[in-house]
Image (tube, rainbow, N blue to C red):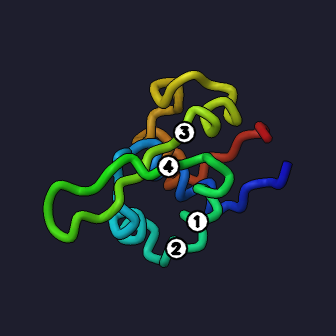
Amino acid sequence: PKKLSSASIETLSIIAYKQPITKSEIESIRGVSVDRIISNLEERKFIRNCGKQETGRRANLYEVTSKFLSYLGIKNVGELPDYNLLKIKNMENITTNED
């Protein structure tokens, strides 16, 4: 299977932690357009449209799928590492030997 790009992994992480989330919310976090990434992740069935935002322009809402979770070898998003802890580790430039 084709490997995920770092941009796709970052986008998936944001969706997993913040779901349900709109494309514009993802873009405001990442600071770049995610149109192509969203299309690719939907094509791979790693994310899905899970409805429309209640207010505003009723943008599509996205969430990760069970296919993505099984790709990671986990059963639910609760098994993911703590997002805030990851942010702190990333900011401190802590490196690990894990691949």
Q: Name the element at disc 3.
A: loop
Which badge, 2 or 3, is on the more N-terminal residue?
2
> Which residue lies at the image location 52% right of the left edge and 73% below the top edge?
35
- Left or right, 54 with reference to 19: left
Which badge, 3 or 1, is on the more N-terminal residue?
1
Local crowd size for mark 3, using a 10 Å CA cut-off: few (<14), some (14–19), many (≥20): some
Report which residue position mark 4 lands on. Answer: 48
Which badge, 2 or 4, is on the more N-terminal residue?
2
* Quadrant of the snapshot with the C terminus: top right
Between residue 70 and residue 54, name the one nearer to us. 54
Report which residue position mark 3 lands on. Answer: 65
Q: CA distance from mark 2 to mark 1?
A: 6 Å
Q: CA distance from mark 3 to mark 1?
A: 14 Å
Q: Amino acid at mark 2?
A: Asp
**CB atoms at circles 2 and 1 under 8 Å apart?**
yes
Between residue 2 and residue 45, name the one nearer to us. 45
Q: CA distance from mark 1 to mark 4?
A: 10 Å
Report which residue position mark 2 lands on. Answer: 35
Local crowd size for mark 1, using a 10 Å CA cut-off: few (<14), some (14–19), many (≥20): few
Which badge, 3 or 4, is on the more N-terminal residue?
4
Q: Amino acid at mark 1?
A: Ser
Q: Name the element at disc 4.
A: strand
Local crowd size for mark 4, using a 10 Å CA cut-off: few (<14), some (14–19), many (≥20): some
Query: Against 23, is 70 above or below?
Result: above
Q: Name the element at disc 2.
A: helix
- Left or right, 49 with reference to 39: left
Q: Amino acid at mark 3?
A: Thr
- Looking at the picture, how far across and down is residue 81, in whole percent? 52, 32
> Which residue lies at the image location 85% right of the left edge and 48% below the top edge?
1
Q: Amino acid at mark 4?
A: Arg
Report which residue position mark 1 lands on. Answer: 39
